[in-house]
Amino acid sequence: MEGVIIGRKIDLTLFDSYQALTNAVLNMFAKYRNGDEDDGPYILSYLDKEGDWLLAGDVPWQIFVESVQRIELLKRRS
């Protein structure tokens, strides 16, 4: 999935936690993964209203929902 740029709109009000959002995004893009179920954990980073890239989970969920502009799914490096 690394290097694949795909744009999708996501209604964040459908989710109540970072884990639920991460699972939904992983399922949404599962067909772009290398076919490996165990190809490593992924993390979400996001662009906030101020133009800063942050790691999802660094702020409470509601603040994240109010400030997020763009999300990226990144493979965690070993």
Image: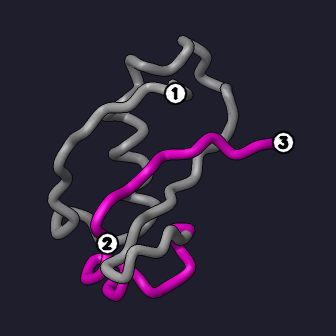
Badge 3 is on which residue? 78
Q: Amino acid at mark 1?
A: Gly
Q: Residues within 10 Å of mark 2 (few under 14, many from 20)?
A: many
Q: Which residues are magenta?
A: 55-78
- Residue 74 falls in image quadrant: top right
Look at the numbered discs 2 and 3 and tell me whether their residues touch, using CB distance below 8 Å. Answer: no
Q: Residue at x 22, y 65 (%)?
A: 12
Q: Earlier in the sequence, mark 2 or mark 1?
A: 1
Residue at image position (32%, 59%) is 70
How is the protein colored in the picture? one colour
Q: Are there few (<14), some (14-19), or many (20+) residues within 10 Å of tag 1?
A: few
**Which residue bears the numbered disc 1?**
3
Image side of residue 40 versus residue 30, left or right: right
- Would residue 30 appear left or right of 57 to someone viewing this image? left
The Cα atoms of the two marked residues, 3 and 1, are separated by 18 Å
> Which of labels 2 and 3 is toward the front?
2
User: What amino acid is labelled 2 in the image?
Assistant: Val
On the image, the x and y values in percent for residue 10 come to 20, 53
Assign a secondary structure to mark 1: loop
Residue type (three-letter) at the residue carrying disc 3: Ser
Q: Position of residue 43 (x, y in %)?
A: 57, 53
In front: 60, or 16?
A: 60
Q: Position of residue 75 (x, y in %)?
A: 63, 40
Return the x and y of residue 38 as percentages of the image width and height.
Answer: 67, 26
Query: Could you tell whether 58 is left or right of 70 in the image?
Result: right
| Category of crowding for the residue at label 3, using alpha-carbon neighbours closer than 10 angstroms: few (below 14), some (14–19), many (at least 20) | few
Q: Is 13 on the left-hand or right-hand side of 74?
A: left
Q: Quadrant of residue 55?
A: bottom right
Q: Secondary structure at mark 3?
A: loop
Residue 68: mark in rendering: 2
